[in-house]
Image (cartoon, grey):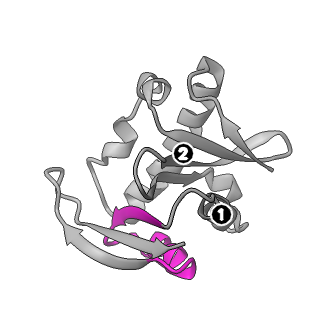
Amino acid sequence: MINKLNNKNNDTANIIFAVFQKSYAIEAKLIDAHNFPPLARNIKGIKKSETTFYGYSENECLAAVIEVDTNNEYLDICSLTVDPSHFKKGIASKLISYVLAMDDFSHAIVETAVTNTPAINLYKKHGFVEFKRWTPSHGIEKLAMSVVI
């Protein structure tokens, strides 16, 4: 089941943070990043965020979170995390389909590490194509992908 999450609520922010930490720890290892910026995100930052969070729950447990910014003319997927105990269940794909079905946007964008092959393949499955590569100050080469909705 997919629901909008109230990230301003302390308990909810704590649960989002826990999913982020578990998922991003796996991603950091996957891309061989020793200083992975998403792992530095704290509960206070989650609570202050003006983005929108949606969660996928299974057996009343938050299994995955997708965070989107809808303050632009396009849908920006800011983060997509799945608790490792729920990997390989198609949950990330369900969350992507859910946010892409929003009526308000003509296209969506997402960024990920160039070496994050599972994420790149997942987004390609949903029609995303690469349009940009760069290396930010933290040194992890990234790519941006977009899709027309």
In this rendering, would 125 be left or right of 73? right
In this rendering, would 139 be left or right of 53? left
**Residue placed farthest to the left in the image?**
137
Q: Position of residue 148 (x, y in %)?
A: 48, 75
The residue identified by callout 1 is 101
Q: Position of residue 12 (x, y in %)?
A: 64, 27
Q: Residues within 10 Å of mark 2 (few under 14, many from 20)?
A: some
Observer-side mark, 2 or 1, equals 1
Q: Secondary structure at mark 2?
A: helix
Q: Quadrant of residue 42?
A: top left
Q: Camera-side residue: 142 or 128?
A: 128
Q: Does residue 18 sit above or below 98 in this rendering?
A: above
- Per the rendered image, the range of residues in magenta is 107-128
> Which mark, residue 22?
2
Q: Residue at x 39, y 41 (%)?
A: 39
Is the C terminus in the top left, top right, bottom left or bottom right quadrant?
Answer: bottom right
Q: Residue at x 41, y 27 (%)?
A: 45
Q: Quadrant of residue 62?
A: top right
What amino acid type is highlighted by mark number 2? Lys
Q: Residues within 10 Å of mark 1 (few under 14, many from 20)?
A: few
In this rendering, would 76 be left or right of 83? left
Q: Camera-side residue: 22 or 138?
A: 138
Q: Position of residue 82 (x, y in %)?
A: 60, 54
Q: Residue at x 26, y 47 (%)?
A: 35
Q: Camera-side residue: 66 or 147?
A: 147
